[in-house]
Image: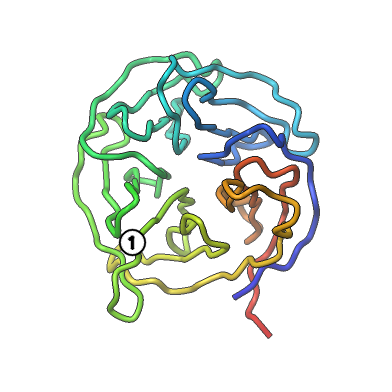
Amino acid sequence: MRAEVLAVLPHDSTAFTQGLELDGDRLIEGTGLEGASSVRVVDPKTAEVRRKVDLPSPMFGEGVTVAGSKIWQLTWRDGVAFQRDKQTLAEVRRVPYSGEGWGVCLDGQRLVMSDGSDKLAFRDPETFDQVGEVRVRSAGEPVTLLNELECTPDGVYANVWKTDTIVRIDPASGNVTATVDLTGLLPREDRADDAVLNGIAAVRGTGEFLVTGKLWPKMFRVKFVTAS
């Protein structure tokens, strides 16, 4: 599959994007890097930051997702997830976990979390306790470096770190059901080495997505279509 670009939108080129999710007309974005990690509410049309809360330094922020009236925000190697009030972004509590935190999304009943391996862990959206896991496979081979996640009725979409590829995963079996090639969406000459594709947010009820990357100056509204 490939991305058909429907619109080009602005994006904060200083945002090291780790998590991206639409909540109505608000874009919830988590950013990383030690001493510069945050969670923010952004106007998706203008890239204006409406509200922003920084993580305590030197914590390294990762994926974010909305779960009811709360937001969960992961950290990379700090072993803690932040539960936040969805409206104010204020910290409600912190929950420890083992291993690394990469991406997270809510499939309706469970949180789905990646850690950079071929594993997706399922967690309770209230307690954050792990309640299951699945290993991701494509043609029988492990798929690793699963990063930012987006849960949809069609499956879990995952950025594959350091590539221009997004995979769609059946969370029941772990099988990859589609691969999307976004090569050239933002030309290589327009981004630094660490400005990789990362950030996918479903536009609910449309079959469309917002996609961007770390330190990208643009965000794209796209539809995934069969490659010609």
**Residue 109 on image: x %, y %:** 33, 45
**Residue 77 on image: x %, y %:** 32, 33
* Residue at figure coordinates x 20%, y 41% from the top left: 130
- 67 lies above or below 173: above
* Residue at figure coordinates x 43%, y 58% from the top left: 156
* Residue at figure coordinates x 25%, y 62% from the top left: 135
Nearest the eye: 34 or 40 = 34
**Taking 124 as reference, is 143 left or right?**
right
**Residue 201 on image: x %, y %:** 58, 48
Q: Secondary structure at mark 1?
A: loop
- 31 lies above or below 221: above
Q: In this figure, which residue is indicated by the disc labeled 1?
A: 171
**Taking 190 as reference, is 182 left or right?**
left
**Residue 76 on image: x %, y %:** 37, 35
Count of numbered circles in the view: 1
Residue 224, quarter of the rendered image: bottom right
- 110 lies above or below 221: above
Nearest the eye: 164 or 120 = 164
- 134 lies above or below 62: below
Give the class, few, some or many, for how many residues have Cα within 10 Å of label 1's Cα (few <14, many ≥20): many
| Residue type marked 1 | Pro
* Residue at figure coordinates x 55%, y 15% from the top left: 88
